[in-house]
Amino acid sequence: MMNNVMIISGAGLSAESGIRTFRDSDGLWEDYDVMEVCSTQGWNNDREKVTRFYNARRKDLHDKVPNKAHCTLAALEQQFPGRIMHLTQNVDNLLERAGCREVIHLHGTLTDLRCEECGHVWDIGYEAQHEYDACPRCESSAVRHNVVMFGESAPEYRHIYDAIASCELFVAIGTSGQVIDIVTIAQEFEHSLLINPKREEYVTAFGSFEKNIDDFFEHFIQKKASQAADEMAAFITQFLQR
Ligand SMILES: [Zn+2]
């Protein structure tokens, strides 16, 4: 029996908890240039500035709380152990704080640091990274944030292919498909569900297809993640119990 569920969640899941992103209305772009603080080029130009940026994001995360959608996803994971592969684009820890144990962070984690020398990753919670920080394993001072930047590879993406191969339902939550092409993934599945508050145009490197992303999904709930949480839970539960 292979009726497992693949979930990809994005910024829309955490936006309702007040996590700011570079998307339209929530304002991070007013304070920062995305390429200066989220790209390898920016990192090489000014490591201090990038470190300050992630220190601020980490501090900002401290008083944020999971919303109903995070909690619903945690309850589903507990109800159906081993049946749900949850991959998130989010670098916050709100899913874990809601009770999730098995989330794969495709773009890294805000509450960890990483050693560029030996690859060791360690938890620093909501603390700032300081200049004098050293790797607890190899003592190297080549320490960085643990978030995937534009211009570097995302090793966790390998799990996307595993999930496609082992799941029969694809659920995309709060992602516009601009970074991960959820349309191409959806086309690999007979059953798919999209949850987004807006209909988004499907645009690729080759231009616009004059279609919306939801046109490629079997089901579409046009709501914010928390408002769609009950419907989503009923849908996934029904699928896993059929
Ligand atoms: Zn190290």
Image (cartoon, rainbow, N blue to C red):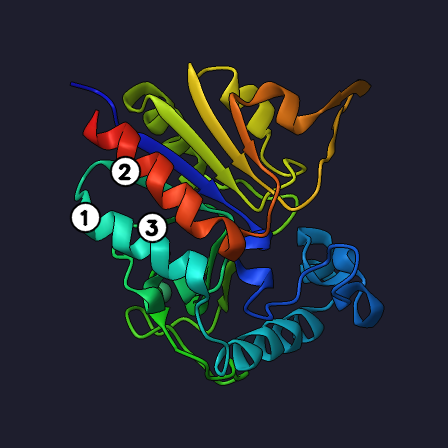
Residue ID at (29%, 28%):
239
Q: Which residue is mark 2?
A: 237
Question: How far is disc 1 from disc 2 in space, using C-alphas?
Answer: 9 Å
Going by the image, does 168 lie left or right of 127?
left
- Dot placed on the residue nearer the N-terminal end, 1 or 2: 1
Please name the amino acid that badge 2 sits on: Thr
Look at mark 3 in the image and give the residue it sits on.
103
Q: Are marks 2 and 3 in contact (CB under 8 Å)?
A: no
Work out whether 59 lies above or below 195.
below
Labels 2 and 3: the sequence-earlier one: 3
Please say whether residue 3 is visible from this viewpoint: yes
Where, quadrant-wise, is the N terminus in this rendering?
A: top left
Q: Which mark is residue 120?
A: none
Mark 1 secondary-structure assignment: helix
On the rendered image, what quadrant is the C terminus found in?
A: top left
Residue 68 location (% of width, % of height): 43, 62
Asked whether the viewer can see residue 90, the reply is: no
**Which residue position is annotated with label 1?**
79
Q: Are marks 1 and 2 in contact (CB under 8 Å)?
A: yes
Query: Mark 3 packing: few (<14 Cα in 10 Å), some, or many (20+)?
Result: some
The answer for how far apart the CA atoms under marks 3 and 1 are is 15 Å
